[in-house]
Image (cartoon, helix red, strand yellow):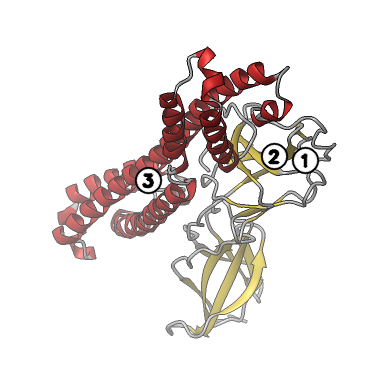
């Protein structure tokens, strides 16, 4: 469910509110003659029933969540293409004028994987403008006007994808607020009519009085502990927790700051499929409830979810050492959301193309070193990972180890 700042006025489930309203309409029809003292007519019952029907058929949050997920994936796919195109364009500039040249620095392409979507789009358009102005100079490095035209179209597609995602999020939030407002409106009428019914039958008909009680508090719902084993599975995108004795349903709330909370789940199941906003740290908490109210919250969860990992960039290789064997050193830009990196290597004769790559290490930092064999060419590429995601491989690089002069 999307996060909404609107608050539900009732603690029962939406399905229970609909069922209670349906029964209430039957009771009110039965008791119209008694309710007439408060001006209640059959039209009021018809209107209440229609309001309930309209609330019941509102699409579930899963409908809009699917649209948001689809828009997110489309945006991520195009963003990956934009980053790769920027790298290709920047490489031509680097080869033409050097990495320390004013022209290369004016591209501002460092840290591509850490850029927000809006900054990435701004950078992409800046690179296009610069390279378009340098087309004649870069033609010898394979740049054509057709490539620039395709690049401009890709940037426009990326902007469209960002707008589509923003629209999907906005619609989801709007529909969440609409459901809450509709439920609150329905509940307001239910409370009003139930108070009338209870007042009429409080001292004359205990059975009918009970028909107008919204919550059964005669015996209480029983004491409840806080849920245990509250967790989020990043592979399946599911919250889960253990059942609580005497609980009839559960509530999950989310917060950006740990202070202002908004409900994202209210139902009977012990699991909840939910995809958080990518790259945003949030707090989450769950509690049980029954007819007596809410229990205590479980221990809060605090985490940042990522829907994808960018491929590592900026891979640089170097050799160090005063005597043989020399040490090859690799480093690359850190990837937001990654906890480790897989380093793959291929060793061939100097001057040869890469052979079969093999995994040589998994490291926690963005550096790797190893001793070398002289007169060999070392190819490397890197993949970023965390506990549930794996990025695409970065572009491979190689370095030649000289012959030992000794």
In the image, what residue occupies the spot 61% across and 29% down? Answer: 10
Q: Is residue 128 visible?
A: yes
Name the N-terminal-most of marks 1 and 3.
3
Q: Which mark is residue 165?
A: 3
Q: Which mark is residue 106?
A: none
In the image, what residue occupies the spot 32% across and 41% down? Answer: 122
Q: Which mark is residue 285?
A: 2
Which residue is identified by label 1?
299
- 366 lies left or right of 231: left
Q: In x, y percent, where is residue 251?
A: 66, 40
Name the N-terminal-most of marks 2 and 1.
2
Q: Is residue 106 visible?
A: no
Q: Residues within 10 Å of mark 3 (few under 14, many from 20)?
A: many
Q: In x, y percent, where is residue 184?
A: 52, 27
In the image, what residue occupies the spot 59% across and 26% down? Answer: 9
Camera-side mark, 3 or 2: 2
Depth check: give the residue in front, 298 or 48.
48
Compared with 300, 214 (above or below) is above
Quadrant of the frame with the C terminus = bottom right
Q: CA distance from mark 2 to mark 1?
A: 7 Å
Q: CA distance from mark 3 to mark 2?
A: 27 Å
Name the N-terminal-most of marks 3 and 2.
3
Q: CA distance from mark 1 to mark 3?
A: 32 Å
Task: Assign a secondary structure to mark 1.
Answer: loop
Task: Assign a secondary structure to mark 2.
Answer: strand
Task: Assign a secondary structure to mark 3.
Answer: helix
- 69 lies left or right of 91: right
- Tags 2 and 1 touching, CB below 8 Å: yes
């Amino acid at each position: 469910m999307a996060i909404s700042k609107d608050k539900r006025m009732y603690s029962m489930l939406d399905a229970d509110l609909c069922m209670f309203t349906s029964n209430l309409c039957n009771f009110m029809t039965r008791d119209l003659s008694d309710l007439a003292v408060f001006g209640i007519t059959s039209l009021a019952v018809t209107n209440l029933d229609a309001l309930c029907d309209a609330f019941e058929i509102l699409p579930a949050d899963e409908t809009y969540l699917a649209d948001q997920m689809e828009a997110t994936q489309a945006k991520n796919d195009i963003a990956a293409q934009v980053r790769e195109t920027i790298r290709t364009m920047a490489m031509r500039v680097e080869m033409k004028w050097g990495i320390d040249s004013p022209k290369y620095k004016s591209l501002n392409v460092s840290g591509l994987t850490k850029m927000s979507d809006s900054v990435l789009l701004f950078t992409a358009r800046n690179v296009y403008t610069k390279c378009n102005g340098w087309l004649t100079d870069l033609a010898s490095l394979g740049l054509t006007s057709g490539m620039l035209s395709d690049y401009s179209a890709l940037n426009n597609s990326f902007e469209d994808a960002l707008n589509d995602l923003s629209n999907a999020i906005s619609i989801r939030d709007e529909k969440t607020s609409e459901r809450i407002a509709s439920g609150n409106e329905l509940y307001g009428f239910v409370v009003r009519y139930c108070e009338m019914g209870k007042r009429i039958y409080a001292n004359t008909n205990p059975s009918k009085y009970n028909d107008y009680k919204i919550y059964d508090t005669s015996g209480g719902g029983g004491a409840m502990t806080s849920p245990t084993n509250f967790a989020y599975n990043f592979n399946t995108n599911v919250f889960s927790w253990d059942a609580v004795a005497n609980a009839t349903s559960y509530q999950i709330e989310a917060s950006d700051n740990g202070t202002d909370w908004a409900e994202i789940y209210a139902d009977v199941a012990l699991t909840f499929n939910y995809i958080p906003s990518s790259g945003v740290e949030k707090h989450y908490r769950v509690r049980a409830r029954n007819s007596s109210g809410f229990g205590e919250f479980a221990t809060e969860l605090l985490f940042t979810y990522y829907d994808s990992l960018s491929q590592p960039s900026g891979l640089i290789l170097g050799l160090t050492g005063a005597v043989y064997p020399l040490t090859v050193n690799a480093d690359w830009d850190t990837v937001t959301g990654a906890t480790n990196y897989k380093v793959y290597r291929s060793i061939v004769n100097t001057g040869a193309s890469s052979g079969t790559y093999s995994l040589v290490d998994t490291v926690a930092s963005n550096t790797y070193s190893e001793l070398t064999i002289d007169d060999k060419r070392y190819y490397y590429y890197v993949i970023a990972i965390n506990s549930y995601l794996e990025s695409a491989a970065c572009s491979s690089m190689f370095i030649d180890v000289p012959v030992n002069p000794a």
